[in-house]
Image (spheres, helix red, strand yellow):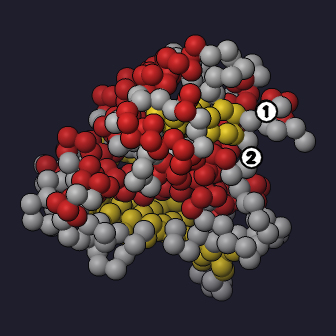
Amino acid sequence: MATNNDLNRKLRMALVGGGQGSFIGRVHCTAAVLDNRAALVAGALSSNPERAKASAPDYDIPATRAYGSYQELIESELSLPEDERIDFVSIATPNFTHFEIAKAAVEAGFNVICDKPMTFDLAQAEELATTVDQSNVVFAVSHNYTGYPLVRQAREMILNGELGEIQAVRSNYIQGWLRTRLETDEQKQAAWRTDPAKSGAAGCFGDIATHAYNLGRYMTGLLPAEISCHLKTFEEGRQLDDYGTAIVRFDNGGLGTVTASQISHGRENDLSIEIDGTLGAIQWRQEEPNQLVVRANGQPRKIYTRDPNAPFMNEAGASACRLPGGHPEAFFEAFANVYRSAFDAMIDRAMDREYERRDTVFPNVHDGVEGMYFIQQCVASSAENGAWLPLKHERARR
């Protein structure tokens, strides 16, 4: 089979961010090339031009396409022949820079895969979404946990009615790495996440609660109605929240909770979700991603394992697998599934075929806007002592 079917070539990738000392840049690169459908050919790897170019050999980016800024990258790539220039830009920078980079890439006609939160604030997110609407680019947001096979398995089970009407959703994202003020020790990842000038209005809730909320929305398809939230900064001197909990009212009458912490001792990256329906319930944990617990009263507890050949696996779950059962798949593969789904749309665009832009299996610009609305309303609710505020944005999708 030809690479990317009738496109018959790899998609050409540029990475913005991801220079020396970055965690997420390497993840983006690994995920993008995992299925041999893309090649990293260009980059602007740091806001510091010298560091940007010095980081290029780490990614095997040729010196001629190692750019000192995203502006130089876009301008130079546009000047190349169409059969040489990049197809898409992956943005792996702190979120206060996302808007300007993404908007410039979209306006230049390049597809985009952007880290979350999508922008610094809601106004930027809405403007960026309008820019995407006015283009024909593919725009994905790397809510990577939606790519786990058993998350997609559960999503299809729920949307097919196997759990009945969904009445309760409990999403938690618990970490402990900010139990002390690492931001004062020149720890780069902690420093920008706790700086309101770079992280935005929320800390912990902007960084990880957005994942927990998105996961519940993605798996259930329930549309939100209202939210009440309490945010707290427990570490003295820190400027943004490091703990919070929210209650969500869904438009079907169901309730959801979102709790996020970055100050819980001994917790690493414990994203988990429980969903209760009238016919059954499911439970999934990111730290044990190859198991999905399914429960129903009067029946033994069932543990679905990630096995593409098992009779209980549905098409959504099986198609997200790469290995047979018993061979663990985890973070890189889930991240790569977001890329793989977006690649399918990019190829359709390149071949001048119609492709879905709103109701995609991968998180898109609509989900990015909703994530920023979630952050805004959580902060506003907390400032009003947990007041109930609207949560259904016009771009919310099932």
Where residue 380 appears, as percent x and y from the top left, is 19, 44
Which residue is disc 2 drawn over?
Answer: 36
**Residue at 20% from the left image edge and 70% from the top image edge:** 180
- Identified by mark 2, the residue type is Asn
Task: Tell me: 246 left or right of 57.
Answer: left
Say which amino acid is labelled 1.
Arg
| Farthest residue, direction right | 1
Q: Can residue 191 be seen?
A: yes
**Label annotation for residue 321:** none
Q: Is residue 167 above or below residue 389?
A: below
Q: Which mark is residue 9?
A: 1
Q: Is residue 136 left or right of residue 203?
A: right
How far apart marks 2 and 1 lie (CA) works out to: 10 Å
Residue placed most toward the observer, 276 or 241: 241
Mark 2 crowd level (few <14, some 14–19, many ≥20, 10 Å Cα) = few
Task: Establish if 120 lies above or below 160.
Answer: above
Label 2 element class: loop
- Disc 1 on helix, strand or loop? loop
